[in-house]
Image (tube, rainbow, N blue to C red):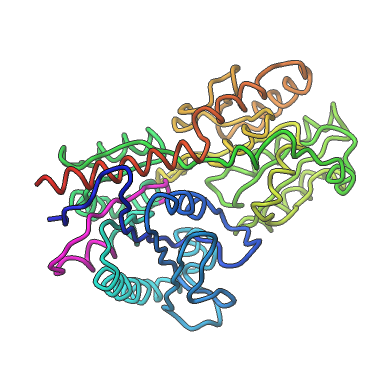
Amino acid sequence: MLKSCPVDEMERMNILVLTSTFPRWPGDPIPPFVYELSRRLADRHNLLVLAPYMHGAQKKEKIANIEVLRFKYWLEKGSLLADGHAMHSNLIRNKWLWLQVPFFLFFQMLMIRRIVKSRGIDLIHAHWIIPQCLAAVVSTLFLKRKPGIVATLHGGDIFGLQWANGLKRLLWNRLSGLTVVSTTIRDEVEEIGIREDVALEVIPMGVDTKLFSPGQYSPELRRRYGTGGPLIIYVGRFSEKKGVEYLVRAMPEVLAKYSSATLLLVGYGEQEEELRNLCRDLALPDGRIVFAGPISNEKLPHYYATADIFVGPSIRMPDGNREGAGTTFAEAMSCGINVIATDLPNFRDFIFDGENGFIVKQKDPEAIAKKILDILGHPDRQTGRNARKYVVRHYDWEIISRRYSDFFRSVAGEKSEQ
């Protein structure tokens, strides 16, 4: 039973945030969505973030208004389970990393128990059902004073680990509440099975609409990459489910009409060498496909706002793994540019074909190429402006963080009445 928590708007809860993805140092290119949400929640609550340690990071520090603790779970040298990539992708890329999983769980659970007992934690917010929610549930099983636990599912943990669906169901049925970042994930949760008394709500990750804005356009970036023609951009991991190869395969048709067009691939991942080889196999002209590497979150708005089109060619994998929500789409839309997504159901939460973006068939380079050419041939369309307006109204971090805070208070209020 959860301790009676104050739910008045002016009261602050003590919240422990569990995550495996969190900025390790200034300019770290890993996705900062947990940090962005946490620093806004810290304006309303007392927040402590627990994240895995990596060589070069601080074990204990204050970032903005957030206290951050990092736990060690393996030797500093060599590959690590949580080295900045998604943990699931790391395990696929390097099977030896499975050896680190029990150590990761053990030391994370040890820290959770210490923090809950010493800091008077009212609520644990666990990002990802495995491993963070698993660690939270197990580590608090035998505590006399049990905090509430809310988990947030981002996609990879629900679509990518289907062999563990029984464990997921067992875990989220022990929670005070569960949030998911898209209606597609909610549908998957309900299909696997969730008790009616577990609060379930769709709340996406947000966008800093002041930072990600059309005003971030950078002529210097166009000069740097030598493009006097259309600039097409992709931002994200180079992994199979992101479908980047289908975008690369679309480029010969685009370049046949716009020979000065440039495709800028921003990110990193296990498929980079394969994609570079594909560019050579397709005999794409030098300089027209640019691997820009990872870019820090502070610089990303310049890349989005300077591009003409953002393409996210995500696919559904044979095992069901696929994109969870698509924060990069919302960031690009916030910068006022045209976006092209594939026909995965989750994108229909916020991309309305022909109104604020475009949707094409997945795994179809020809469809991607035709849509790019169609957009470039109609530069007077209002879709980019409509995209910006939609994100400002629905995805701004202030709106999203308020929804999370209200959800936490609602869960705490319901538990305190039991």
Q: Residue furthest front?
A: 10
Q: How many marks?
A: 0
Q: Tell me if residue 55 is in the magenta stretch.
A: no
Give the vertical position of 396 relative to 81 (above or below): above
Q: Nearer the viewer, residue 188 or 248?
A: 188
The answer to whether residue 357 is visible is no
Q: Tell me if residue 155 is in the magenta stretch.
A: yes
Give the vertical position of 302 relative to 342 (above or below): below
Quarter of the rendering occupied by the N terminus: bottom left
Q: Residue furthest left?
A: 418
Left or right, residue 313 beside residue 112: right
The answer to whether residue 175 is visible is yes
Which residue is found at the position 49% from the left and 39% from the top?
398
Question: x%, y% of residue 399?
Answer: 46, 36
Left or right, residue 387 beside residue 50: right
Question: x%, y% of residue 43?
Answer: 44, 51
Give the vertical position of 352 relative to 47 (above or below): above
Question: x%, y% of residue 290?
Answer: 79, 49
Give the vertical position of 414 relative to 269 (above or below): above
Left or right, residue 304 beside residue 287: left
Which residue is found at the position 18% from the left and 62% from the top?
146
Which residue is found at the position 28% from the left and 40% from the top?
189
Which residue is found at the position 73% from the left and 53% from the top?
276
Question: x%, y% of residue 415?
Answer: 16, 47
What span is colored magenta in the figure?
135-156
Q: Quadrant of residue 269?
A: bottom right
